[in-house]
Image (cartoon, grey):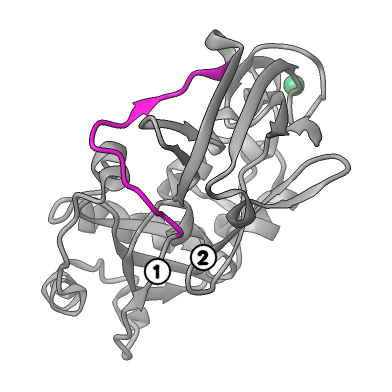
């Protein structure tokens, strides 16, 4: 069987374990069913997720000219505190910015390799946590727009991390942390504009990933450089495929690459 298409991040479904789906032009693959199977991956070309041209991918699946032009790749995506739609101020496209920024956002703590703070649209919970490979997460505030979430994250970053160590996450070199305690401790640092949005309930979400074998020394697979790779799939965590020989492939990091995938 041969499948082909442009890579986009895998879709997921909250279940025990998490279900992963790779959606290609004509196929919908439940990746959990490929565990224990040998997969051949081949790089074919680039296809920008916006203009569809075969141009080198710059960031987030977009070619360089799209990345610096389209509203989906503006600075406020990665830096929510730069959001301005709540002031009626346009960055690249006010209609798009209002639609995305003026909706409920969550500031959360997630533990993927260490405890970190993050921001997501409420509609992206728990997808965002799954994508980061977090095995536990908890919400801190629910605010009505992206700006308030951004300034809260900036304030909390001074007291807790905001990055995931992908190697530790993939090795499952993680410690259970009491996120309820972390949340209580951080409450005092929430900015005045957001403090009324503190969430009273403190339910921790646990996430179970389908991994049969964790790598001891994960080595990243660069399919663009190596052109092809063959390996037996032994796990799915975050947006990574984990292979038996300790190679790991970041599907999200390769958005915009057209690949073929064959099973044997
Ligand atoms: Zn493009």
* Residue 259: percent from left, percent from top: 71, 25
The answer to whether the residues at label 1 and label 2 have Cβ atoms under 8 Å apart is yes
Q: At 59% across and 69% down in the image, what residue appears?
A: 123
Mark 2 secondary-structure assignment? loop
Q: At 35% across and 48% down in the image, what residue appears?
A: 213
Using the image as rendered, state which of residue 236 and residue 129 is in the foreground: 236
Using the image as rendered, state which of residue 184 and residue 155 is in the foreground: 184
Q: Which residue lies furthest to the bottom in this view?
A: 201
Q: Give the range drawn in magenta.
A: 210-223
Whether residue 218 appears in magenta in the rendering, the answer is: yes
* Residue 170: percent from left, percent from top: 32, 44
- Left or right, 212 with reference to 13: left
Can residue 63 be spotted in the picture? yes
Q: Is residue 224 depicted above or below 169 in this figure?
A: above
What is the quadrant of residue 85 in the picture? bottom right
Q: At 25% across and 31% down in the image, what residue appears?
A: 217
Q: How crowded is mark 1: few (under 14 residues within 10 Å), some or many (20 or more)?
A: some
Q: Is residue 134 depicted above or below 261 in this figure?
A: below
Q: In which quarter of the image is the C terminus?
A: top right
Classify mark 1 as within 8 Å of ligand 1 or not, answering yes or no: no
Residue under pointer 2: 18
Label 1 to label 2: alpha-carbon separation? 7 Å
Residue 207 is marked as 1
* Residue 105: percent from left, percent from top: 49, 67
Mark positioned earlier in the residue sequence (1 or 2): 2
Whether residue 61 appears in magenta in the rendering, the answer is: no
What is the quadrant of residue 115 in the picture? bottom left
What is the quadrant of residue 30 in the picture? bottom right
Mark 1 secondary-structure assignment? loop
């Amino acid at each position: 069987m041969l499948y082909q298409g442009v890579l986009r991040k895998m879709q997921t479904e909250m279940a025990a374990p998490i279900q992963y789906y790779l959606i290609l032009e004509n196929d919908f693959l439940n990746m959990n069913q490929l565990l224990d199977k040998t997969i051949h991956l081949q790089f074919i070309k680039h296809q920008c997720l916006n203009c569809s041209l075969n141009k080198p991918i710059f960031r987030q699946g977009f070619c360089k000219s799209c990345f610096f032009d389209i509203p989906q790749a503006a600075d406020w995506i990665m830096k929510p505190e730069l959001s301005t739609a709540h002031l009626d101020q346009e960055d690249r496209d006010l209609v798009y910015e209002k639609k995305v920024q003026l909706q409920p956002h969550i500031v959360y703590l997630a533990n993927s390799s260490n405890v970190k703070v993050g921001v997501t649209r409420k509609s992206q919970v728990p997808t965002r946590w799954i994508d980061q490979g977090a095995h536990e997460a908890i919400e801190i505030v629910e605010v009505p727009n992206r700006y308030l979430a951004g300034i809260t994250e900036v304030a909390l970053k001074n007291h807790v991390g905001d990055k995931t160590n992908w190697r530790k996450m993939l090795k499952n070199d993680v410690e259970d942390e009491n996120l309820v305690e972390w949340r209580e401790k951080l409450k005092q640092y929430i900015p005045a504009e957001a403090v009324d949005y503190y969430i009273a309930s403190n339910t921790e979400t646990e996430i179970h990933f389908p991994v049969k074998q964790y790598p001891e020394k994960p080595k990243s697979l660069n399919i663009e450089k190596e052109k092809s790779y063959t390996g037996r799939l032994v796990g799915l965590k975050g947006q990574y495929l984990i292979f038996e020989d300790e190679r790991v492939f970041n599907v999200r990091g390769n958005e915009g690459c057209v690949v073929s995938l064959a099973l044997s």
